[in-house]
């Protein structure tokens, strides 16, 4: 709105009067027509095809971590979660030169990172990582569940940073005293900058096409939605052909 206190200090993503496409007081992109402020539009570079451009928003969310936390090439970074966001976060953070270790439950998803030379570890539900407690300088929690948070808390070193990259279902039972004693920096992280995300896509330095698991024509939208909500599915594309 450019009038409220967050907007005036430059925090436009926290505008007190904001609307959210398809979520809060604004039609989504599946409506026949939608209206957006022109400042919300970003030109897609010519080298970026539509199938990659659709990853701009989650890739921007991954880039936001670098806006909030200083990561050095000498740092150790753990990423918990092998969903779309976790896989993108691991790739973006690996570009810093830091030692990145991704932890998830699905070997086939972790293969996306393994092919790019990123260290990965598959664990079963209830299992802990083989990395020792306090291994990481920075831990990114991208599962959105309590077990992921517990794993992340165990991996971060004293005076390290714990980045919460997912919203959580329900409430968490958290021992805040342990965070205080170890002086952990807790960072909430959500939407991010589109410009660097588009630059990464144009430079083809992040693999997003491996995250596409199915494609449907617009006439098959119902089938596409049913496929997209199944557990473990990464990205499903609707193609207007």
Image (tube, grey):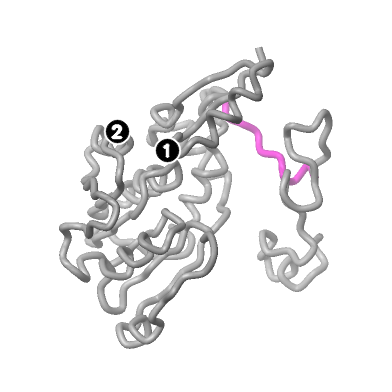
Q: Which residue is mark 2?
A: 108
Q: Which residue is mark 1?
A: 232
Determine the secondary structure under disc 2. helix
Q: Quadrant of residue 170?
A: bottom right
Residue at the image point whose x is 42% and y is 54% from the top: 142
Image x and y of residue 237, in percent: 56, 25
Is 43 magenta? The answer is yes
Image x and y of residue 126, in percent: 27, 57
Report the number of discs: 2
Q: What stretch of residues is rendered in magenta?
A: 37-46
Q: Is residue 135 left or right of residue 148?
A: left
- CA distance for labels 2 and 1: 11 Å
Residue at the image point whose x is 32% and y is 87% from the top: 181
Residue at the image point whose x is 82% and y is 67% from the top: 3
Q: Quadrant of residue 137?
A: bottom left
Q: Nearer the viewer, mark 2 or mark 1?
A: 1
If the image is split into quadrants, where does the C terminus sit?
top right
Relative height, residue 90 to residue 5 (above, below): above
Q: Is residue 222 left or right of residue 150?
A: right
Cβ atoms at labels 2 and 1 below 8 Å apart:
no
Residue at the image point whose x is 25% and y is 62% from the top: 75
Q: Quadrant of residue 145?
A: bottom left
- Choose the circle earlier in sequence order: 2 or 1: 2
Residue at the extreme top of the image, as rendered: 241
Is 28 magenta? The answer is no
Relative height, residue 15 to residue 50 (above, below): below
Magenta segment, prevailing SS (helix, strand or loop): loop
Image x and y of residue 26, in percent: 80, 47
If the image is split into quadrants, where does the N terminus sit?
bottom right
Q: Nearer the viewer, residue 219 or 27?
A: 219
């Amino acid at each position: 709105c450019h009038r409220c206190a967050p907007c005036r200090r430059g925090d436009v993503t926290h505008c007190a009067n904001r609307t959210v496409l398809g979520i809060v007081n604004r039609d989504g992109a599946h409506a026949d027509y939608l209206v957006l402020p022109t400042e919300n539009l970003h030109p897609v570079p010519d080298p970026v095809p539509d199938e990659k451009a659709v990853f701009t928003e989650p890739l921007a969310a991954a880039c936001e971590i670098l806006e909030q936390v200083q990561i050095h090439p000498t740092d150790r970074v753990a990423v918990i979660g092998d969903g779309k966001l976790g896989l993108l976060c691991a790739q973006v953070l690996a570009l810093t030169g830091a030692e990145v270790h991704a932890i998830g439950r699905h070997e086939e998803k972790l293969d996306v990172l393994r092919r790019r030379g990123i260290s990965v570890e598959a664990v079963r539900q209830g299992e802990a990582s083989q990395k020792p407690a306090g291994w990481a300088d920075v831990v990114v929690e991208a599962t959105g569940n309590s077990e992921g948070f517990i794993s992340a808390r165990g991996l971060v070193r004293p005076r390290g940073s714990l980045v919460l990259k997912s919203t959580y279902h329900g409430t968490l039972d958290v021992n805040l005293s342990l965070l205080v004693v170890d002086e952990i920096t807790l960072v909430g992280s959500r939407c991010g900058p589109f410009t660097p995300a588009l630059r990464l896509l144009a430079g083809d330095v992040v693999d997003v096409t491996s995250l596409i698991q199915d494609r449907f024509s617009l006439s098959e939208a119902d089938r596409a939605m049913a496929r997209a909500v199944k557990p473990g599915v990464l990205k499903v594309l609707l193609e207007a052909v």
